[in-house]
Image (cartoon, helix red, strand yellow):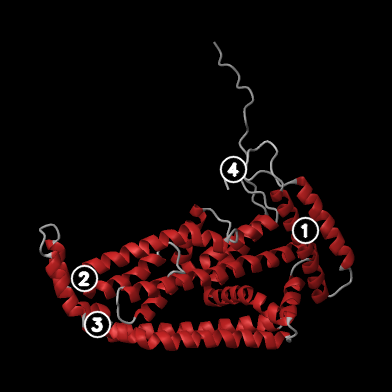
Amino acid sequence: MSEPATLGAVKPRRLAVTDRGILFALLLVAAAWIAALLGPVILAAIGALIMVGTLNPLVGFLQARGLARTLSVALVFLAMTAILVLIGLLTVPALFAQVRELIDGAPLMQQRLAERLGRSHLTWPVARAVESANLQDLLLPSGKIAFEYSSQIVTTVGWGLTTLALAFYILADPSTTQAALYLLVPRRFHIRLARITLNLETIVGGYMRGQIITSALMALFTYVLLRICSVKNPLPLAVFAGITDILPLIGGILGAIPLVMATLPRGTVMVVTVIVSVVIYQEIENRFIIPRVYGRVLRLPAWALTLALLIGAKLMGVTGALLSLPVAAGIRMVIEELRVELPGDGAIDPHLRERDDQVESLYAELAAGAGAETSAGIALDIADSVRRSDAADTADAASVPFEGSKPGPS
């Protein structure tokens, strides 16, 4: 018997390698290579844009009161500098005193901890390890390490000042920056670029302002807790806890370590009280404070937040972890505004595409023959009007109850 013929045989598809595809791959490799070389410059630019998105509403508030743009920017930067200097004067001397006291009391603290651990057969090996450890070498780095740290601090301060200067120039003269950006982008993408820039300011500014609020609340809670526990120099420890609260997931653990070390001389009861109090506050912050402060600014699922944090920390350390969440939220927003259809999200609403075509046609008519600066203003005005209209429609739709649903408990 002969074998049956194969019905509907699928021919293997060949992957066509075109000159355009090769050029695109080479451009991607070149872009990645340039990004690796210019990592600090790109990081400074991202930091400046984040600062612009954070401070621009304050500058706009002062402008609305009749102040000039440059004067408003100068006042905002002077106020920010004054606040940072005041925080430094209040915390840095006390922090050095706290560190000095910790270093001086390290041997006695080490002996007490080893004695407590040595009372149990289960913790006796840990007691031996604690007793043999040299805390002085751990707390006081060697000359070479201290020199490397000092060099890194100087470099970081230099890049920080560069970021501040870049943010100041962008805030003082935003029209020039916008004109240069719109001059590089083809006109058919100007409306999408306007939507992206407006939403980026909302995401970045909302995230940074929310982070300031949550960090301030964490510092206040820590200060009150340490005052109640009669811990010496609670202010620098509270400021450190507020700063580490910026880091998601691991910030609470890092901030709790010096609190526990400072509370050890007060006894086991105080240590347990501090640990339990910090854990309870972290739960309250994660479940109640953060959702109300950030709202829907980030709009990222938990797995995306964790993945972005890990990638940022791997690429750029602590700085990358700080910037990972707003950058990830910005990338998702850019994908949405460019109307990119991702797997699993479904097709783009045809009414939305039709509305986009109408808006882009209106922009092409109004901006015909205009320069880059004028075109940028027109595109931003149109995009802002559309965004306000969408927000109003969403609010009206949310205020209308579903007819078939039963009212839930208030």
- Dot 4 lies on which element? loop
Image disc number at residue 267 = 2
Amino acid type, callout 1:
Ser
Which residue position holds label 4?
A: 408
Left or right, residue 349 beside residue 91: right
- Dot 2 lies on which element? loop
Image disc number at residue 103 = 3
Q: Which of the two marks, 1 or 3, is nearer to us in this view? A: 1
Left or right, residue 38 beside residue 387: left
Whether residue 67 is visible here, answered yes or no, is yes
Crowding at dot 2, Cα within 10 Å, few <14 / some 14-19 / many 20+, comes out as few
Q: Which of the two marks, 3 or 4, is nearer to us in this view? A: 4
In percent of width and height, residue 284 lies at 44, 60
Dividing the picture into quadrants, the one containing residue 27 is bottom right
Q: Which of the two marks, 2 or 1, is nearer to us in this view? A: 2
Amino acid type, callout 4:
Gly
